[in-house]
Amino acid sequence: MTLTGSGSAHDPPADPARSSPTAPVPARVNQYGPPRRLDRRVALVTGASSGIGAATARRFAMDGWQLILNGRDRHRLERTASGTSAVVLPADLAAPGGPRLLAQSALHTTGRIDVLVAGAGLGWTGPFTAMPHTDIDRVLTLDLNATLHLVREVLPSMIAAGRGRVVLLGSVAGCVGLREEAVYSAAKAGLAAFAEALRQELRGTGVGVTFVVPGAVDTAFHSRRGRPYDGTRTGLLSPGCVAGTIWEAVRHNRDEAYVPTWLTVPGRVRGLAPGLYRRLLNRFG
């Protein structure tokens, strides 16, 4: 029963000697100069140290986007940024004021954020009654609260510009509710509801919301959460596959994207035949 990084943010515990958890500092910019305004499109990607976040950053870089990369480990972020013009802003979003400081630093660095890919998160596995209260708070703080606060900080600049897109990374756990991942499932389900509500609120502003729901992904999440993946490795998605889906969803202004697409089925069964859904869930998990 361990606290772990999620599919997009598999950072190890932050090293205080490497980065500050509360004050993101650009690795490649003059933080004391006036705010810049880049002509290139800008994507802020959280959880970019490894996994889905790192793969997503590399996919956007292939199309010439300016990247702002966030995670807790500067060295891992710099490996993701290698060969690009990405700006590295290491910070712990779960720290007090973390989302606000990150948004301020990002906007000061580039003058704009066209796309926010919110991929940072934590997972925990084990019986809910055995889960420490501190870990309940940590999962909900990063997976749900910090994401909402970061979106709140970034949105005004997008609305003022009349364009932009928020990409929220969900999970199949939030769609079906996975046993021994109750809090993680609750956090991802909360993100799904938030995405739907915010999408309706932003109609007519030029700002869109994309909710991406991947299945099991071949990252360090499963080993770090304290229990290996139950299926075969061949059944796991690659981070690059999920990153490609995120890229296409942004490119085509899609509201939702499931990876693989058959993941839409459990939700439909749940809505149309809840009794059948629960029997299947009890049998197959």
Image (cartoon, helix red, strand yellow):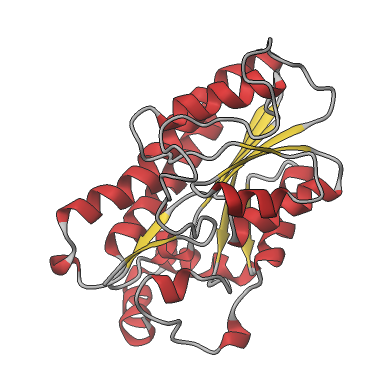
**Which image quadrant is residue 132 in?**
bottom left
Residue displayed at 49% across by 49% down: 120
Q: Nearer the viewer, residue 274 or 244?
A: 244
The residue at the point 63 percent across, 18 percent down is 108
Q: Is residue 270 left or right of residue 87?
A: left
Left or right of 208 on screen, residue 100: left
Residue 204, visible in the rendered structure: no
Q: Residue furthest bottom?
A: 232
Q: Which residue sits furthest left?
A: 129
User: As displayed, is residue 71 above or below residue 176?
Assistant: above
- Left-right relation of 116 to 245: left
Residue 129, position in %: x, y?
A: 13, 67
Point 49% across, 87% down: residue: 231
- For image coordinates 46% across by 25% down, the residue present is 100
Residue 241: horizontal and vertical position, in percent? Answer: 71, 66
Given residues 27 and 252, the one toward you in this image is 27
Quarter that holds the C terminus? bottom left
**Figure check: 99 above or below 161:** below
User: Dividing the picture into quarters, in which one does residue 52 lie?
Assistant: bottom right
Q: State the quadrant of the N terminus.
A: bottom left
Image coordinates for residue 199, horizontal then vertical, percent? 55, 34
